[in-house]
Amino acid sequence: MTRGRLVGSAAVALGAAGLAALAWGALVERKRFTLREISVPVLAPGSDPIRVLHLSDMHMAPWQSEKQEWVRGLAELKPDLIVNTGDNLGHEDGIPGVEYALAPFAGIPGVFVNGSNDYVGPRPLNPFTYFGGPSVRSQSQPRALDITGLHGVFAALGWTDIDNAAVALELNGTRLEFFGVDDPHHGLDRLDLITRAIDDLRANDPLADETWPDPGKAPEPRPTVTIGVSHAPYQRVLNSFVNHGAQLILAGHTHGGQVCVPGFGALVTNCDIPRAQVKGLSLWDSGLHTSYLHVSAGLGTSIYAPVRFACPPEATLLTLIGA
């Protein structure tokens, strides 16, 4: 066989492999919804575990019934808490699908922050632009989404908005402090407000001064865990959260890279987080402090890029346990 024929055969084989990978990613893996379960040792020794369901990046479109049914099924896990890290909408008519998917979680405590695709709809983008850094706003005007209606769905579930705000909850005998920021990808995070939000929370929250009523022993301070929540894990946000005392940080946005290379991992992160921390549980250091960081690979994709490879859509059940 001549060199030209060898090159031609290799090109044909490579093209066929590429088409097969594209077909797998678009037709199979994009719908291979996966539940990951991990334990995070952030509670005081002897504390009762807390089961936290982390949902992110659903990018819901009205026709995505398989995704909606799978999310509904997660209610069987009986989580103690839901944390939603944004990008719930993937279409201007996506709210009914989100409402249906989340309906079984009514009455379960939850907190949420906004992602960029809770404000504006997706738009066609050249995927190769992601190799140049995080995506930027298009010059064309994106279609505004009904974020007020989306927040109404969350409010009906009993969830709390922590965009540039803080809140405290008590679960299974542990006091949880949450603080979060609005979408950092479009610069809506107000890190300057976090200190005041935490100070106001601790000054005005009646849970802050309670102690353990243990007969026969001197009262002990109620154990507290501080959790930071953001849609996009930009380093400025992570560093600020760690410096504000977060023991655990939850984020989404990256889609885990969405298209990964086996043995290499994510090609892009769509923010400035290192590729090695684009999804899953890791540690984030800032100065002399360290926090656990969990980045969800998310449950969806843009309707204009409906493909995943070596990175299935996911939700995560984090069980917080005693250190």
Image (tube, rainbow, N blue to C red):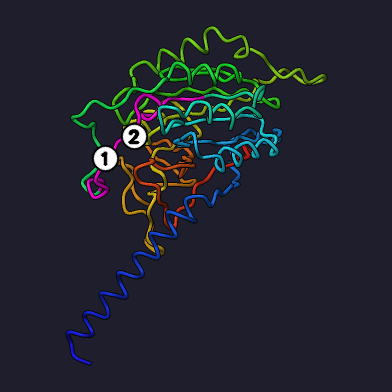
Q: Secondary structure at mark 2?
A: loop
Question: In the displayed structure, does residue 302 sit left or right of residue 76?
Answer: left
Q: CA distance from mark 1 to mark 2?
A: 15 Å
Height in image: 113 above or below 197?
A: below
**Residue 8: percent from left, percent from top:** 22, 79
- Mark 1 highlights which residue? 134
Which quarter of the figure has residue 136? Answer: top left
Mark toward the start of the polypeptide (1 vs 2): 2
Q: Residue at x 63, y 40 (%)?
A: 319
Closest to the observer, 65 or 257: 65
Q: What stretch of residues is rendered in magenta?
A: 112-130
Instruction: Identify the residue at the far right of this view.
Output: 216
Disc tally is 2
Q: Residues within 10 Å of mark 1 (few under 14, many from 20)?
A: some
**Residue 21: percent from left, percent from top:** 39, 63
Q: Residue at x 41, y 60 (%)?
A: 23
**Residue 133: percent from left, percent from top:** 23, 43
Q: Identify residue type, mark 1.
A: Pro
Q: Residue at x 49, y 52 (%)?
A: 312
Q: Identify residue type, mark 2.
A: Pro
Closest to the observer, 319 or 12: 12
Quadrant location, the C terminus = top right
**Residue 92: percent from left, percent from top:** 40, 27
- Mark 2 highlights which residue? 122
Height in image: 119 above or below 247?
A: above
